[in-house]
Image (cartoon, rainbow, N blue to C red):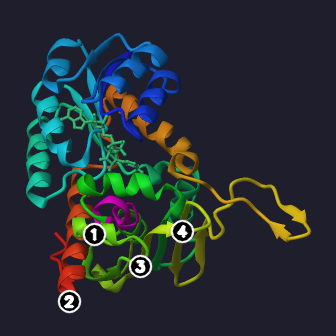
Amino acid sequence: VKKVRLGIVGLGRLGMRHAETARYCVRGAELVAACSLNPAELAGVKEQLGVEHCYSDFGQMIAGAGIDAVLVVSSSSEHVSHITQALDAGLHVFSEKPLGTTIEECRTAEKSVETHRNLVFMLGFMRRFDPSYAYAKRQIAAGAVGQPFMVRAYGLDPDALIDGALRFAATSGGIFLDMMIHDIDLARWFLGAEATMVHAIGGTFKYPDFALHGDVDNATALMQFEGGGMALFFTGRTAAHGYHIETEIVGTEGQIRIDGVPRKNRVTLYSERGTSEACVEAFPERFGEAFTLEIQEFVDCIREGRRPEVSVHDGTRATAVAYAATESLRSGKPVYLSPR
Ligand SMILES: NC(=O)c1ccc[n+]([C@@H]2O[C@H](COP(=O)([O-])OP(=O)(O)OC[C@H]3O[C@@H](n4cnc5c(N)ncnc54)[C@H](O)[C@@H]3O)[C@@H](O)[C@H]2O)c1
């Protein structure tokens, strides 16, 4: 089977990382084209990664670069436009989360994916590919905790990177769509059910500027799932200790906890200040392996004619729940969702 020729749109915080992954770490693919609105990023990808074809216009890249597939890592508000244009041009598509920033956008993407059933579409819920999360999922499937009925998830970004979060605030879609959406997807995945009720609260406890975009710096949400399952989420942008992604799945016969202490490595420092362990600093460090594995899976699906497990429907559903959380935060009331 010939190598998959990849193009990438978006070369920002995550895009450059995905470009490096596609260039150096993925078997059966080559990165041949890149698109960004930022000329410095394009110069960087050409010089550092030797990408042949660079574009500032997405339409020109999909029409002219001779590619088979696109990695969409542009700003969240651009995803659906880039997804539909690429599918219409006959290209396979991997898109970063969130699928869209409105439910209407998600429905447009779903329709486009359904129209192009011959093409592979995959959404970047990369945590499902992290070896620890994949192991936990296998344990649960094997009955290790009995019937899972509750998920408790912490998703905390480091205070040290707050400047980037503030810059990104205008296009992020808000804390639920931008951050909690990963935990929402995990809860759906682990419980094997859809959320039916969301009650969210939050506030700007440290950075009032988030309020300028109708956003908050810390939020919690309580959810009910079909069949009575429960989830409790805490998502924040001001963790003093680093990047802290912790997930717990509670079942009738046991519990699984992933990264209760978000250790950077296996080192413990013993000094006059006591004992200490360094914390993971940011998402590329924690989920680097997952980013590689998910793009490898996308390429393998194209080459082997398989469908990825993470579907466009997962994107719409997680977005709908994140939206309900946003609505609940604003209204102060629980929001009920129809599970299908
Ligand atoms: N999976 C994760 O954990 C994770 C982590 C970070 C970001 N993301 C997602 O990745 C996406 C990108 O995030 P980021 O932090 O890299 O953003 P960023 O703002 O740093 O970069 C955005 C990039 O998109 C490009 N772009 C925007 N509009 C464009 C257009 N119309 N045509 C061509 N290029 C365009 C910009 O030039 C830039 O290169 C977001 O949707 C975000 O939600 C996911």
SS for callout 4 = strand
* Side (left or right) of 103 relative to 281: left
Task: Say which label, 4 or 2, has the lower sequence index.
Answer: 4
Seen from the viewer's position, the closer of residues 264 and 163 is 163
- Range of residues picked out in magenta: 175-184
SS category of the residue bearing label 1:
loop
- Which residue carries the number 2 mark? 333
Q: Quadrant of residue 220?
A: bottom left
Q: Kindly tell me whether residue 132 is visible in this rendering.
A: yes
Q: CA distance from mark 4 to mark 1?
A: 17 Å
- Judged from the image, the secondary structure of the residue bearing numbered disc 3 is loop
Res 296 visible: no
Location of ligand 1 given as a quarter of the image: top left
Give me the C-alpha separation between circle 3 and circle 2. Answer: 21 Å
Q: CA distance from mark 2 to mark 1?
A: 17 Å
Image-based side of 257 in relation to 296, left or right:
right
Q: Which residue is mark 4?
A: 239
Q: Amino acid at mark 1?
A: Asp
Label the magenta part by its dominant secondary structure.
helix
Nearer to us of marks 3 and 4 is 3
Residue that badge 3 annotates: 205
Q: Name the residue nearer the viewer: 262 or 46.
A: 46
- Judge: label 4 CB < 8 Å from ligand 1: no
Q: Which of pointers 2 and 1 lies earlier in the amino acid sequence?
A: 1
Expressed as whole percent of the image width and height from the top left, the position of residue 207 reads 39, 70
Residues at marks 1 and 3 touching, judged by CB atoms closer than 8 Å: no
Q: Which residue is mark 1?
A: 215
Badge 1: how crowded within 10 Å, few (<14), some, or many (20+)? Answer: many
**Residue 216, quarter of picture:** bottom left
| Disc ID at residue 246 | none
